[in-house]
Amino acid sequence: MGNTRSAPTLDDVAKEAGVSTATVSRCLNSPERVVEKTRIRVMKAVEEMGYTPNFAARVMAAKQSFTIGAIIPTMENAIFARGLQAFQDELRERGYTLLVSSSAYKPGIEKEQIRTLVARGVDGLLLIGHEREEQIYEYLERHRVPVLIAWSYSPDVRQTSVGFSNRDAIFELAQNVIDAGHSRIAMISGFTEGNDRAQKRVVGIRDALCANGIDPDSMELVETTYEIDSGANAFVDLMSRPTRPTVVMCGNDVLAAGALRGARKMGISVPEEVSITGFDDIELAEIVSPPLTTVHVPHRKMGHKAAQELIAMVEGSSEGASTCINTHIVSRQSLAKPPKNAATNK
Amino acid sequence: MGNTRSAPTLDDVAKEAGVSTATVSRCLNSPERVVEKTRIRVMKAVEEMGYTPNFAARVMAAKQSFTIGAIIPTMENAIFARGLQAFQDELRERGYTLLVSSSAYKPGIEKEQIRTLVARGVDGLLLIGHEREEQIYEYLERHRVPVLIAWSYSPDVRQTSVGFSNRDAIFELAQNVIDAGHSRIAMISGFTEGNDRAQKRVVGIRDALCANGIDPDSMELVETTYEIDSGANAFVDLMSRPTRPTVVMCGNDVLAAGALRGARKMGISVPEEVSITGFDDIELAEIVSPPLTTVHVPHRKMGHKAAQELIAMVEGSSEGASTCINTHIVSRQSLAKPPKNAATNK
């Protein structure tokens, strides 16, 4: 197995075919402008030597690379999987290839990956959430790479977004929780720094508490990584504090699955002793026991719509129109009334 | 938001800076060979106009792109997620960026994506499983792109692999199943066409049956997609046939989670009336109820090792050495003895 150091250059191909480098370029970019005999000789040399045509030159000829980049925070769990697959399916239908990078929720890594993808000539870019340095948006504008934000929608940002209101979605769930009789509400959230989706979910619950005359500062909050084990540990932490909550609302289904595991470990029954809620409605939500009451995010719909809009921006038929996707609450067994003694204890 | 049609060319930058295109190229590729005053003027034009330097030229200058490509069959479930994240983490440590594509288990799509990634100048490529057209390996060799196969290990293939023996792994599990007293074994497998991992898992169970004097043709087999719903449907199908199996061995944990769902739907209790086994030991295996007896695949270890070896191949310090990663059986509650009446019915 060789390595890239010995890859043939344009020069090598030109020498092999006995033509100028300009002729080789023309064969690759505008073959119709080269006489057939020469073209066949050149392409034979290209193929035999395993020359990879200068990609940038081909991009310039085609004006497009038909490649879209996407940077997601993690590949480790299924949060982004379904939406991204739908995004890719739609791109493929329209003749585009998707290249994905994952940033491990680190803004510095995301920035590097944006530059890498732009350097590889992507026609457009999908990013998750709005919050990042303004410079990055300026960089993308300067390089004329259209960017679309998914998983988040907010009327007061200028970037084109296909997403949902994280604040409104969890507000509705929190209202259901309060209507069921809960007032001692705790929350397990993903780390909020640099993650506007996580921030808005915390705000949404606080706003619902306010709207119902409950002190939002009474809400116990633990921030952690989006992992099952982290959710379990956070749950144990919350249930070991002086005043136990009657419901633990989780920033997503992965954390909620962890909370259920924590409850099992502590011998606390759900929902009899404590209710637990999720967010996303990924397959996990239905599989765990008891199944989770959660916010259903139409991931596939979001992925398809995001691809359609980003392609329209790349192809110049849209200047970028945002879409707010509606979420809804799915009621399953993990949310019930608070236990009687807890209610009277309040 | 503009589009790529109006992206500035090398010519535009040269005009703006009042130099030749060759000088602009030299500034980008060998800045030390250009006098400072000119270099500053050119780089200012490059930055102001948002010119993306010709990527292929930079790759030639650096001899490497420090980018690795990976093509996985699906992003939809967690099968590849953990191993891929470890692969990316290790690459990052070593200064490489990972670009991922998913092929939806379709050889034609994979072939396209290989060409796309090679055209973007990746230094090396990670592919899943060995089975693909010989032409593809020839193409990669001709382009001098080292390729490493993961998730599969077989002593009789020439490609460098960091994987495990799918056949031996499930053989061991099947032996455990037989030792527990089962002989009426059914299997739910992923589609085997073009998927050597799936093929080897079917072969492994059949070999174990043979080795224990059970007719391998007596094994009822359903092939389906790796989805929970598909697993549930396949389970219902198998349990509705004239002779019910006492154990349903599944090609992976996702199918096994589906089988559990099917059992719940039919009111069949696991493992009292039928045992179910998985493969992979992803988080799902521990979360479902009852938790799954399954094959533990050390995905993180495989991902790290694959990255180390592929980088060594790219950097020329290895010609490619294969590694067989050991798997082991994890015993949980989904596998027990066959029910008494079934045993006497045999």
Image (cartoon, coloured by chain):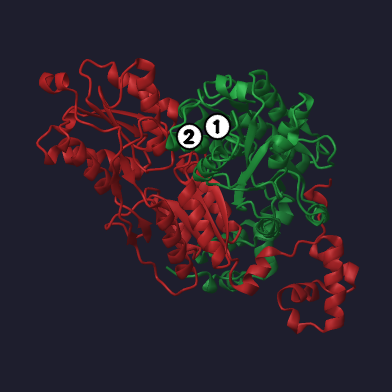
Chain colours: A green, B red
Q: Which residue occupies 67% across, 71% down? A: A20
Q: Nearer the viewer, residue B151 or A12?
A: B151
Q: Nearer the viewer, residue B246 or B70?
A: B246
What x and y, as percent, mark residue B263?
A: 35, 21
Q: Nearer the viewer, residue B143 or A314?
A: A314
What x and y, as percent, mark residue B237?
A: 32, 19
Q: Could you tell me which chain the residue with mark 1 belongs to?
A: A
Give the residue at mark 2. Answer: A263
For residue B42, above or below residue A82: below
Labelled disc at residue B207: none
The answer to whether any part of residue B281 appears in the image is: yes
Q: Which residue occupies 84% across, 73% down? A: B42
Earlier residue among tags 2 and 1: 2
Of circles 2 and 1, the one toward us is: 2
What x and y, as percent, mark residue A220?
A: 65, 39
Q: Tell me the CA gap for discs 2 and 1.
A: 21 Å
- Dividing the picture into quadrants, the one containing residue B331 is top left
Tag 2: amino acid: Ala
Q: Secondary structure at mark 2?
A: helix
Q: Callout 1: 10 Å neighbours few (<14), some, many (20+)?
A: many
Question: Which part of the image, by quadrant, shows the N terminus of chain A?
Answer: bottom left
Q: Which residue occupies 71% across, 47% down? A: A125
Labelled disc at residue A282: 1
What x and y, as percent, mark residue A316?
A: 80, 41
Q: Callout 2: 10 Å neighbours few (<14), some, many (20+)?
A: many
- Dividing the picture into quadrants, the one containing residue B61 is bottom right
For residue A260, above or below residue B320: above
Tag 1: amino acid: Ile
Q: How many marks?
A: 2
Question: Which part of the image, by quadrant, shows the C terminus of chain A?
Answer: top right
Q: Could you tell me which chain the residue with mark 2 belongs to?
A: A
